[in-house]
Amino acid sequence: MVVGQSSGKLILDSIGVGDALEDDNGKKGIVFKIDILKYRTFAQYYFKLSDGKGTIEILMRGQ
């Protein structure tokens, strides 16, 4: 699944551990950990990728 800053809350919430994920910039991998931080009207989604491929971070407004 391809995600980016324009992805909606329903799409981001449907992503689970073990899903293949790719961002707008071409970073891709298998999700092994998900962190969601919420503060007032913002939510930050962190999808940590396996094999040291990094993290895909999505910042959303208007939660």
Image (tube, rainbow, N blue to C red):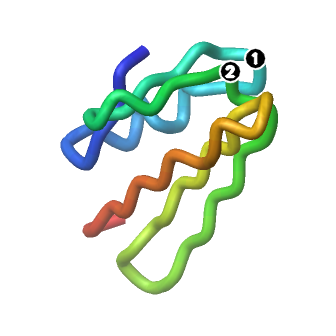
Q: Is residue 15 above or below residue 41?
A: above
Closer to the chain start, of discs 2 and 1, is 1
In the picture of the structure, the residue carrying the numbered disc 2 is 30
Task: Give the CA distance from mark 2 to mark 1.
Answer: 6 Å
Q: Tell me which amino acid carries mark 2.
A: Ile
Q: Is residue 48 above or below residue 29?
A: below
In the image, taking residue 23 as reference, residue 47 lies left or right, namely right
Q: Secondary structure at mark 1?
A: loop
In the image, taking residue 48 as reference, residue 60 lies left or right, namely left
Quadrant showing the C terminus:
bottom left
* Residue 49 image offset from top left, x and y in percent: 69, 35
In the image, taking residue 16 as reference, residue 11 lies left or right, namely left
Residue drawn at point x = 77 percent, y = 30 percent: 50
In the picture of the structure, the residue carrying the numbered disc 1 is 18
* Residue 28 image offset from top left, x and y in percent: 51, 25
Q: Secondary structure at mark 2?
A: strand
Quadrant showing the N terminus:
top left
Q: Tell me which amino acid carries mark 1.
A: Gly
* Residue 47 image offset from top left, x and y in percent: 62, 43
Question: Residue lying farthest bottom?
Answer: 40
